[in-house]
Amino acid sequence: MKNIVNRLFSKYAVYICILNDLSIVSKVSNFHVLLNFKQTCISHSLFNLLSLSVISIHKNSELSNVRKDIDADIQYKVI
């Protein structure tokens, strides 16, 4: 799972938001890539890695103000 995440982030080298609800996209002004996963496609281990990666990416960026919304959306949507 970690290799999948690393490959995605190194390939795109952009802000990646892992979302199920497309409505949150309107809150993100500078997103480049949107990966839309269905609930059944996300295991807890993958979710944990992606969540940490999203936090890491947004930590020092202009998107930090929407980080909580993104994390909350992921946590709410993942089974």
Image (cartoon, rainbow, N blue to C red):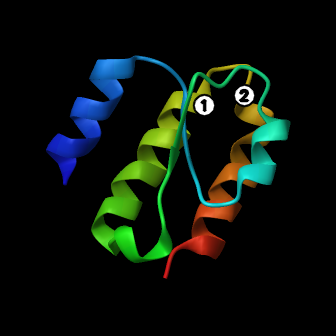
* Residue closer to the observer: 6 or 36: 36
Q: Position of residue 13 (x, y in %)?
A: 40, 17
Q: Quadrant of residue 5?
A: top left
Residue 18 sits above or below residue 66 on the image? below
Q: Position of residue 24 (x, y in %)?
A: 78, 49
Q: Which mark is residue 77?
A: none
Q: Quadrant of residue 6?
A: top left
The residue under the point 63% across, 56% down is 71
Q: Is residue 75 left or right of residue 8?
A: right
> Do the residues under discs 2 and 1 have CB atoms within 8 angstroms?
yes
Q: Which residue is mark 1?
A: 58
Amino acid on which the number 2 mark rests in the picture: Leu
Q: Which residue is mark 2?
A: 63
Q: Position of residue 2 (x, y in %)?
A: 20, 48
The residue under the point 28% across, 21% down is 10
N-terminal-most mark, 2 or 1: 1
Q: Is residue 5 left or right of residue 24?
A: left
* Residue closer to the observer: 68 or 70: 70
